[in-house]
Amino acid sequence: MRVTRPRRRSLLWRASALAGLLLISSCSSGADSHAVARSPAPLPEVPPPDARPVISVIAPSDAQLDDMLKSLRVELSEEYRVTISPIRVEDSSADLVARIVARDRPRAVVLVNNSTVLLYRSWARTAAAPPVALILMASFAEELQRTVPNSVAISYEVPAVTAMVGLRTLGLDVRRVGVVYRQGFAGHIARQEDLMQLEKLTFVRQELSNKPRAQDLRAALVNLQRAEVDAIWLPNDNGLLSPRFLTNVWLPYVSRLGAPVVVAVRSLVNEHAEFGTFAAIPDTQALAVQAADLLYELADADWKLRASDVRLPISVKRLVDVRLARRFGLDSTQFGQVDYLIGR
């Protein structure tokens, strides 16, 4: 009996499926991006004040953040009044941040996503005494936190070593990990490599300029293919995940690499696009608890910070594309250890 295989989606369709789903990374994953103000935005409404001190949360207006923000409010509600200011970053300016801070007079500000952090940063750099800021769900938080006055952060990148150990549980003997990155993120890659040594993992590096061309990325992927790496680890960098690169480089080449691609964003493990085989991402509910604990810790320290205080996420969710996993010979009997099976 002849089996008719489904036709593969076009590269353009597959790239559109990925680009349309890059929720977190769509808001500028680089520490040097700039938000553009178009017009004054109205001040978000908040409940009437009460006697509790305030924690202000500034976040993009996005329904997918609601559960995490509600959890954060519940965790803090016993001692703090939590104001949540959802904003449209593209229509906002540093003046809106100034008005939120003036309205709330918060003990601390929680900033969700890179674009919100950049907007806040432009205000905080001119403020005489900005409150403590906690950076959440922002890509490359280590680099970003250093540029924001009086700030701490919880990293949104799960360490590469954590992802690779997760891949090992599915039966892949991972030792040499290919990574393509832009020059500006060399420090981040070096820190990841230090952690990987504990598990006897090494990076095969391909460093590109901060403004790479498509042919540069193609050459890097060809080099990784020739190096016969066991897996590719892809940091969440919009500079390498633009629709142009997805369409013209990643999707045409990813099937030729002969190794699973491990990604840092849930949407890149997508049954319609056949791109990421495996992902390890923060558990957002646990992230809310961790953020609340850190704020209570800061309160106990009278809101005084330690230098470069960036924490790793304490809980991780794992995703696997079932079809790609089988293609690369991963052990399907171990799929029960994965939180989300895509395309099963």
Image (tube, helix red, strand yellow):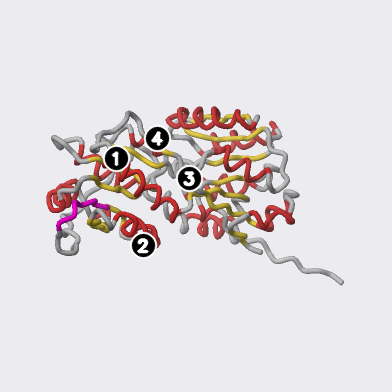
Task: Calculate the distance from the C-alpha at mark 4 to the C-alpha at mark 2.
Answer: 25 Å
**Image vertical order of residue 269 relative to residue 161, above or below:** below
Q: Residues within 10 Å of mark 3 (few under 14, many from 20)?
A: some
Pointers 3 and 4 in contact (C-beta within 8 Å): no
Q: Which mark is residue 314?
A: 3
Residue 60 is covered by the magenta coloring: no
Q: Amino acid at mark 3?
A: Ile
Give the extent of the magenta segment. Answer: 51-57
Residue placed under numbered mark 2 in the picture? 66
Whichever of labels 3 and 4 marks the residue nearer the N terminus, that label is 4
Query: Of label 3 and label 1, which has the lower sequence position?
Result: 1
Query: How far apart in space, not on screen, are marks 3 and 4 (Cα)?
Result: 16 Å
Q: Label for residue 142? A: 4
For mark 2, does the 10 Å Cα neighbourhood hold few (<14), some (14 to 19), or many (20 or more) residues?
few
Mark 2 and 1 residues: CB-CB less than 8 Å, in contact?
no
Q: Secondary structure at mark 1?
A: helix
- 67 with respect to 327 (left or right): left
Between the C-alphas of marks 3 and 2, the distance is 20 Å
The vertical placement of 100 against 173, above or below, is below
The residue wearing badge 1 is 298
The structure residue drawn at horizontal position 84% and vertical position 70%, both measured from the top left corner, is 2
| Sequence-earlier tag: 4 or 1 | 4
Helix, strand or loop for disc 4? helix
How much space separates mark 3 and mark 1, taking CA atoms? Answer: 18 Å
Measure how far apart labels 2 and 1 are at the Cα level.
24 Å
Q: Work out which quarter of the rendered image holds the N terminus and state it.
A: bottom right
